[in-house]
Structures are given as structure tokens and as C-alpha cells.
Amino acid sequence: MLPSEHAQPSIRSQALRFPLYLLCVFVIGLSVLSYEIILTRFFSALFSYHFVFVAVSLAVLGLGLGGLLAARLPKPRGAAPLVYGVLQGRAAFFLGLSLVVVLVLFAYFPWMRRVWFLSLIALPPFGAAGYSLALTMRLFSSESSRVYWADLSGGALGTLLVVVGLQKWGPVVTLLLLVALITLISGLCFLQARSWKWLGAVASLFLALLPLWELSTPGGPVDLRLNRRQGSGNQLSRLFQNPAPGTTLVSSEWNAFARTDVVEIWEDGRRARFLFTDGGGASRIPQFPRDLLERSWVEEDPGLFPFLAAAPRKVLVIGAGGGRDVLLSLRGGAEEITAVDVNPEALRAVRRYAGDLARLKNVRWVVDEGRGFLQRSKERYDLIYLPLVYTDRPEAISYSLVENYIFTREAFREYLNHLTERGLLVIRAHDFNDFTRAALTALEALEGRSGNDSRAMRHLIGVHRSEGFLLDPQAMSYPLLLVRNTPYQPQESSRILKIALGAGLYPIFIPELVARSPFSALAAGGETPQQFSRRFPQNLSPTWDDRPFFYQTNRFPPRPLLLLLLFVSAVLLALLFVYLRRGEDFPVRRPLKAAALYFSALGVGYMLIEVALLQRFIQILGFPTLTFSVLLFVLLLSGGVGSWCSRLIPVERGTRFILVLGFLLLVASFLFFRTLPSLVSWAASQELWARSLVSMGVLFPLGFVLGIPFPLGVRLLEDRGLASEIPWMWGLNGVASVLGSVAAVA
């Protein structure tokens, strides 16, 4: 165990030593939050959807395990202040060293890219940080408010700085800068403790960063090269496992939003380029004007059908990607085109590789989140086109399994409200699941615009290219769904059927004419959308803003989430059992039981609130990375202020204050989430700076209150002579936090 409590007064008397430990906590808090965000970027580029959340959640578990390690270490010998200086220096040094090891293993060993293996690799830095923070919290338990303030404030600053670093240099260079900062802090700790041998190790690590810095350019030796043959299973990696002759990686760019790769392949003897976002979501970059003049793939693309059917003049493309659908709009005769994409690198790739497409006067390119852009616009369009947006990649925001709100009932209503009288909403789906879910969501969005569900089906048209659909209704590949505000009349349906057949497309359902199985009963009014969706083993029911997971079609939580939930629950129960019954001579006292449950409940509750806030505020701010950064920054900063102010609460009144605070927090959270829809509606028409400021102002009081319970609980432990139990409480809180984050999205 650590030194006895009798040594602590002499430690606290070293007033000049405390600011360095406080600085160490600040830097480690900054580093661990930055590393967590960088890690989501790495996993987003390597894996798909749910595995990102599983991997990062397991890594966050390291914070709690590090606290438990601090509780189990043997007693050190020597002058207590110097020994603690060495321990803190070692923790910081190991944190920096493990970050370098993580970077090298991720970059040089693609054959090790298995989610479980990389999750284990990602654990040690979190464990080192958890150990350091728990150690400091115990050492300065009477100053827990200040220590917790330093931790949260450092994390708040880290959420801002890491976004700047990702945007300017990418995750690899940003991670190396973090290692340099941590190494400097480690050196200061060893210098104060006069540990010259460890200072030499710190200097060696610092020098090792220099060659890594030189090799860390995008696509260089120290980078996530997704074009290796031994890949991680995403779309880009699979492409290079058995590459066709002439397949090359043209460029790679990192930013705070995503990793963007441009790949060149040879198609029918011609060069074709595709844009990949985080290793997936391939989007063709057309060659303008060559592709438009020669009409090779353009004429065969089923995405041209809506333009032939409606002849729109004014078009909005949400999720423009490489610009393929912009070219289809031009081929379809559109006179005015607005192309929106949330990734700025996509627009840069179009400007660089798509010829003059980005310089056409009748095409307006906008970097924004599609639904938010539309909410702030007063324009009406003849056609709104959603071509497979946000589909094959998890993004940084997938740490919380939060999808963009593009395919929800409320979003569809927004699109329909921005259409002209006979304007079309077009959704180009992946397969049967996506198509069916989009159709059912559209039916729900049309409520109030038509009569019963069978009449609402007269607003929808579905077509498909593959003949296999006639034999197997679920054998769809990139079907098209067309939705409009007014129902189709019989003569319109006949005209559209002719156009579809002439374009080589097969009808799935066309009002008054065709309704193939399994949609025939739904179109005839023989069953409701709810009855229809229950016919399938997968969950195809409509999505809405409170549950926006469009691509999550399992009726139960995904298997990785369930396994993680069971694993973390088992770990937490085992820790509680071991803690409360360790040693025959250890009395199981009521205060310790209450404390263990209290700190575990804090971890679960905090993450439940944070994930719920993240799901809601992405509607207000729009940009996923911006939402993540603003939310964490405000909650951590205000939580740090709340922690600092908790010193003013008399410790003898702490228990009563916690009970009152818990009740008030429940009431405030309930009222907060009840009023959020009004805030979302108001924010729709505001500029980004106004939405950001209002979001910060709304979140600050909640974060302030959330920052009080943890340090107050630590002070109560110390007041009752239980300061040695603080690392245990830190560990239980960390493990429970993972349980809360999983439960929030399961």
C-alpha cells in the first residue's frame, strides 16, 4: 500500500511542492482528453461503427484500473515528498512512452489490427493517467477540490487544443506534441525529486521524438496507411487487399472531422478517382467536363432517374462528397445547384481533382451539416437529394454512438417543408433495410398531409435496377425512394413508369400501378406501417430525433455493446465484492459500502447525462466534432469551477448537502431535457456563433452542479479517516463511467 496517513501532514507542509503536482494534474487531464479524442480518430479510420465505441470504452476503463493500481501498490520508502515526486514522474513518463508505443504499433503492424488487440494497446496510457490522478487525489485529499479542478480544467483546454491540432497537423503530429508536453512535465517532477537517472530516461524519450516527427507526414512511415494489404476490414482496406492493376492512393488528409483519402483506379480503360472518408463511404469524383460529354457511367447511373422524372430547375444535394450527384444534376438539366457537405476536405478534393466542376457559376458549394443548413434557409427546391450520406464511417462522434439527424421523421418533415409544390425528396439507399426504413419514416413524416397510410403511399415511388428483386424482394442494391408533398395522379404514375422502364429500372411501388411484395399489402391499406415492420427480424421501424440510429437495425443492442455491458458489469461487481470483503481483518463498515455505491452511481449518472446531452446538442450546433468539443469543454470547465467552489461547503454538512443536491439535480435535469426541444427550434435560424454561445450558457450551470459531488465525497472520506480508500473510489468511479456510457446507447 501507499505511505500511511501519518506521512501526509509532512507532505502537505511542502507548500512549494503542491503547485507542481497541480500543474502535473492539469497537463495529464489535458493529455488524456486529447488522447481520447485522437483515439476516436484512429479507430474511426480503422474500424466500422459499433467497434469504435467498444474500443474507446475499454480504453476509458483504463482510468479506473489505474486508480485501482494506485490503491494496491506497496509502501514506498524514503522521504515522502521525494518519493511521491518520483512516482508522479514515473507515471507521466510511462504515459508519454506508452503513447509512443501506441502510435508505432498502430502504424507499423497492420496485421495486428484487431479491435480487441488495439483496445488492449490503447489501455496503458489511460491506466498511467488514472494512476497519477488517483495518487494525487489521495495525497492531497484535503485539497481534492483544487486537484479535481485542475483535472477538469486541463481536460477542458485539451478538448479545444486537440481540435486545433487535428485541423492543422492531423492526429499523428498532435499526439507527438502531447508526448513532448508530458515528457516535459515528467522531467520537472524528476528534477524536483532530484532523480538524475530518471531525468536521463526522460531526455532519451524526448530525443526519440525528433525522428518520429520527421517521419509523421500523411502517408509516411509513422501514419495509419490504410492502403496496406493487411487491413482492418473497412472499405478502403478491402480495396487494397486484392487491388486491380493501376490502383493507387493519390492523397491522404487528416482534419478534426475525418481522414480523407483519394484513390485512383482504372475503369474500362479510363482513370477514375474515388473519395473515401475514414476508409469508407466511397464517392466518385467525376472528371468535368469529360464525363458529362462522353456520358459513359452517367447514363447508366440510376441516380439520374429522378431528374428525368421531374426535370428540376433548383436542386439541393445533401452530402455531396466527391461531386458525383452534382454532375448527375447537371446532366438532368438543373439550372441552380447547392451542394452541401460537412467535410471541408471533400470540397478541396473536388477542386483539386474534378476539373472545373467546383468553379461552375450555377453550382454553390457549402461546408455545413445538411439539415442545419436547410433549417436556416428560406429557399425552396424542386429536388432535395440525399445520396448515401454518413453511412460507412463512424466519425469521431461515434464514441457515443450518436448518428447525424439526417434520416429522422423530423428531418424528413423539414425537407418536405423546403420543397416546391411538386418538388421531390430523393433518397438513394444502400439495400432493402435502408430503403424500407426510409419509406416507413417518410410515411410517418407525411402524417397530416394525407389521410390514412394507404393514401400516404400515393406520395411515394420506389425503383430499383436489379432483376434479382423480382425473385428475392430483399435483393436490393442502391434502390431509389422518391417522396413528395402531393399524391401522384394516375396519369403521372403512368408517365413515371415509362421513364423508369426506359432507364432500365424496375418499379418497387408506383401509386395506382405497381406494388410488389412485400409492399403490396401496405400500399393497399391491408396493414399499417407498424404491422409491416414487425414482419421482419430486423428493426425497420421509423426513426425520430429521440432515437436517430437509422443504420442500427438490430432489434436488440448490438452484440459488441451487450458483451461490453456484461463485461463492465461483471468487473464492477467483482471490484465491489473484493473491496468490501478484502482481508479477514478488514471490517465491512457501512460508510465504505455507502461510499462505494456513491462513487459508482456518480460515474454511471454522469455518463448518462453526457451522452444524452451529446445526442441533443448535435441538433443545435450541427457539426459533430464541434458539438463534441463544445460540450466537453463547457462541462469540464464548469465542472472544474464547481469543484473549486465545493471547498466552501462545510464538510460536516456534506452528507446533507449531497442529498439535497442529488434531488435538485434530478429535477433540474428533467426540466432541462423537457425544454431542450424549444431551444433546438430557436437555434435553427441562428448563426453558428450565437448557437455556440447559447449552448455554453445553457450547459454551464448544469456542469457547475455536476462538478461538486465528486470532490465533496473525497473530502467526506478524508474527514472520516478513510483517505487511503480514495484510489479505490476513483477506480470504481472510472469503471462505472464506462457502464453508464454503454447503458446510455444500449
Image (spheres, rainbow, N blue to C red):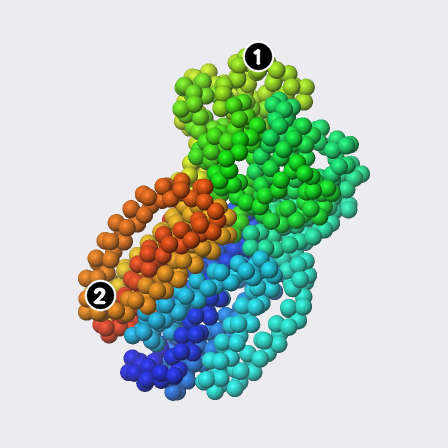
Residue behind mark 1: 491
Q: 374 or 654, which is in the foreground?
A: 374
| Lateral position of residue 112 relative to residue 743, left or right | right
Q: Is residue 427 above or below residue 515?
A: below
Residue behind mark 2: 654
Q: Residues within 10 Å of mark 1 (few under 14, many from 20)?
A: few
In the picture, the quarter occupied by the C terminus is: top left
- Residue at horizontal 48 percent and vertical 87 percent from the top: 194
What percent of the width, then of the height, locates residue 79?
38, 87
Q: CA distance from mark 2 to mark 1?
A: 75 Å
Picture quarter containing residue 496?
top right
- Residue at horizontal 46 percent and vertical 84 percent from the top: 192
What percent of the width, then of the height, locates residue 597?
27, 59
Q: Is residue 112 above or below residue 31?
A: above
What percent of the width, then of the height, locates residue 547?
41, 40
Furthest residue to the right?
A: 269
- Report the label total: 2
Q: Is residue 70 above or below residue 309?
A: below
Camera sees residue 637: yes
Q: 700 or 729, which is in the foreground?
A: 700
Q: 499 or 2, which is in the foreground?
A: 499
What percent of the width, then of the height, locates residue 654?
22, 65
- Residue at horizontal 69 percent and vertical 42 percent from the top: 359
Mark 1: which secondary structure?
helix
In the picture, the quarter occupied by the N terminus is: bottom left
* Residue type marked 1: Gln
Camera sees residue 471: no
Mark 2: which secondary structure?
helix
* Residue 696 image label: none
| Lateral position of residue 585 relative to residue 331, left or right | left
Q: Residues within 10 Å of mark 2 (few under 14, many from 20)?
A: some
Picture quarter containing residue 356?
top right
